[in-house]
Image (cartoon, grey):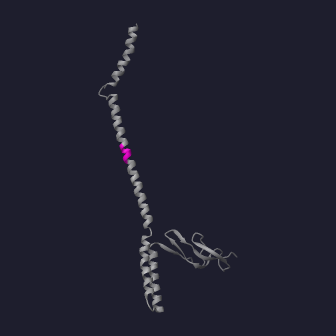
Amino acid sequence: MQDQENQEVQQPSDDAVQAAAPVNGEPSLEEQLSATEAKLAEMHDAFMRAKAEGENIRRRAQEDVNKAHKFAIESFAEAMVPVRDSLEMALKVETPSIESLKEGVEMTLKQLTSAFEKNKLVEVLPAQGDKLDPMKHQAVAVVPADQEANTVVTVLQKGYMIADRLLRPAIVTAAQAK
């Protein structure tokens, strides 16, 4: 009886050996392990390449941002060079007349206005009676006036915006509440 038990105990171990061998065309455990290791190596390689590509993209984007910061003013500077040239030429005139000075200043102002428009530098010039906008106007005084309270009475200095960002608020006086 013990021999039978020994044979039964040995029988499952023989089955385990047979399970490791290919059955019905299935790969052995060693073949499956080596195939899995190959897939792992392939996936690891793909991961490392993707990681390197991501790092390259991040580095290139950072270089682009640095260049954008460095050369952001280039367009405006190019538009301002002719304005400076005009001012320097006006100073070289030996005996300017009032008319020639006025004409030169008007031409220079046109160049400056063109440079501002080209670079989206827009005036903030509220009209009398406009509602006071604290995002665009700075009231330096409140004066009695025959108009609605918190409206612009006079503009002391116009303001400027670059695109949608305020560069300098318009300096105004506002109407006092009655």
| Magenta residues, start to end | 45-49
Q: Picture coordinates of residue 48 (x, y %)? A: 38, 45
Queried whether the magenta region covers residue 46, the answer comes back as yes
Residue at 37% x, 18% y is 13
Quadrant housing the C terminus: bottom right
User: Hey, which quadrant is residue 62 in on the image?
Assistant: bottom left
Magenta highlight: main SS: helix
The percent position of residue 116, horizontal first and vertical second, equals 46, 75
Is 128 placed left or right of 65 in the picture?
A: right
Farthest residue to the right: give it: 178
Residue 96 at x, y percent in the picture: 45, 91
**Residue 78 lies in magenta, yes or no?**
no
Screen quadrant of the N terminus? top left
Q: Where is residue 139 in the image (x, y as percent from the top left)?
A: 62, 74
Residue 30 located left or right of residue 85: left
Q: At x 39% / y 14%, what residue is drawn?
A: 9
Residue at 44% x, 80% y: name it: 84
The vertical placement of 12 against 98, above or below, is above
Between 167 and 148, which is closer to the camera in this rendering?
167
Residue at image coords 38%, 8%: 3
Q: State the count of labels.
A: 0
Residue 16 occupies quadrant: top left
Quarter of the rendering containing residue 24? top left
Residue at the top extreme, as displayed = 1
Q: Residue lying furthest left in this view?
A: 25
Q: In this view, does 29 lie above or below 135?
A: above
